[in-house]
Each structure stands twice: as structure tokens, then as C-alpha cells.
């Protein structure tokens, strides 16, 4: 078995803009520019110690790349007109057979050991939105996957339990897309 992890690290640029809410759930000492970088670096090291070999991070800013990717194979994808992107950290001993930068979809994909590993940041929209942008994005990502190859879809789904993104992923055959917390 192989340990994998995913985490939205919360980019300073989004937190500071005030356009995405108050982030009241974030520990106050981590609400300052740069404060989460050291914390994130510590978490990545802890994940490495327990044997995690693939880590998918969302909302990684360019200034954090060299710090977070030390000792890993690093693949970064940035969406146009966005100051932050998705970072795949893959243990050096793993053979990356293929990498696709699917940046228009705020996604990247690597094939490792014959498995598609997808790192995505799904767009938020109200669950009942007509033309839900996250649903369109998720459908486009799923259409790019090889249906003959197993896949792990790791993402900030910007969805809630029972929501439309999770339902679409379940319908596509993904397991373990349920949980008691929103993403």
C-alpha cells in the first residue's frame, strides 16, 4: 500500500483579498502573510516520516515552491489569471510515467505505477447553481482520464457532504468521496 495525502494550504493572496470569506475557522496565529508556510513545511515533513509518498497541495503560491518541494519530485500547475496553483510532491523513488499540466482546469495529473493521480482545485458555486462551474470543471477532468486505468482524484472539491461534486465523482465510480466535513 502507498500513503497519499491532499491539502488546500490556503494561499495568502486569497486570504488577504477578503473576497473568499473571513476564514474564521483558521487558527488566528496562522492568519498572517507567510505564517502558514512554516506550518505547511512541518506538516509535509511529518507526512514524509509516516511514509506518505504522494502529497497533493492546492493554492500554492510561487514563493513557496522551493521551500515545500525540497527532497521531492515537484510538479506545479497554475491556472491562468491566478496567483496560486496545484503542487504535486512525489517521493524521489517513485517513477512518474507521465505528467499532464491541465492548468486551464486548475488541475494536474501524474501516472505513477499505472495509476492516474489527479490534483485539482474545483471551482466553488452554490450547490443549486445553473451551469455550476465546478461540475463543468469536474466533468472535463473526468473526460481526460483513461477509463481503463485506476485513478485517485485528490482535490479541494469546494463541496459539502451530499453535494453535486461528490455525487458526480461517486457516479463516475470513485469511492470514499463522502465525509462529514465540507471541503
Image (tube, rainbow, N blue to C red):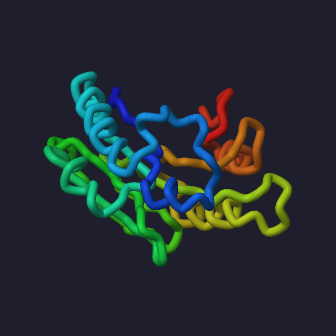
Could you tell me which residue is drawn at 65 percent across and 62 percent down? 139
Q: Position of residue 151 (x, y in %)?
A: 48, 47
Q: Position of residue 22 (x, y in %)?
A: 62, 47
Could you tell me which residue is drawn at 46 percent across and 49 percent down? 10
Q: Is 128 above or below relative to 27?
A: below
Q: Residue 128 sits in which quadrant?
A: bottom right
In this view, the residue in front, 12 or 92, is 12
Q: Of all residues shown, which one is farthest toward the bottom?
A: 81
Which part of the image, by quadrant, shows the N terminus? top left
Could you tell me which residue is drawn at 76 percent across and 44 percent down? 163
Q: Is residue 135 visible?
A: yes
Q: Is 131 above or below relative to 125?
A: below
Q: Is 85 above or below relative to 54?
A: below
In this view, the residue in front, 36 or 8, is 36
Q: Of all residues shown, which one is farthest toward the top?
A: 50
Number of numbered callouts drawn: 0
Q: Is residue 97 visible?
A: no
The answer to whether 35 appears left or right of 155 in the picture is: left
Which part of the image, by quadrant, shows the C terminus? top right
Q: Position of residue 94 (x, y in %)?
A: 21, 44
Q: Position of residue 91 (x, y in %)?
A: 21, 42
Q: Is 34 above or below relative to 137?
A: above
Could you tell me which residue is drawn at 79 percent across and 69 percent down? 131
Amino acid at each position: 500500500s502507498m500513503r497519499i495525502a491532499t491539502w488546500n494550504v490556503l494561499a495568502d493572496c486569497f486570504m488577504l483579498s477578503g473576497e473568499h470569506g473571513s476564514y474564521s475557522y483558521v487558527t488566528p496565529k496562522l492568519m498572517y502573510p507567510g505564517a502558514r508556510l512554516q506550518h505547511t513545511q512541518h506538516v509535509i515533513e511529518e507526512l514524509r516520516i509516516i511514509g506518505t509518498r504522494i502529497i497533493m497541495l492546492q493554492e500554492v503560491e510561487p514563493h513557496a515552491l522551493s521551500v515545500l518541494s525540497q527532497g521531492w519530485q515537484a510538479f506545479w500547475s497554475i491556472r491562468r489569471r491566478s496567483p496560486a496553483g496545484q503542487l504535486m510532491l512525489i517521493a524521489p523513488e517513485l517513477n512518474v510515467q507521465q505528467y499532464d499540466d491541465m492548468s486551464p482546469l486548475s488541475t494536474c495529473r501524474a501516472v505513477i505505477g499505472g495509476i492516474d493521480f489527479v490534483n485539482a482545485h474545483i471551482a466553488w458555486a452554490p450547490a443549486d447553481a445553473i451551469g455550476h462551474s465546478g461540475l463543468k470543471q469536474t466533468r472535463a477532468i473526468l473526460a481526460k482520464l483513461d477509463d481503463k486505468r485506476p485513478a485517485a482524484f485528490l482535490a479541494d472539491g469546494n463541496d459539502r457532504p451530499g453535494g453535486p461534486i461528490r455525487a458526480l465523482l461517486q457516479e463516475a465510480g470513485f469511492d470514499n468521496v463522502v465525509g462529514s466535513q465540507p471541503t
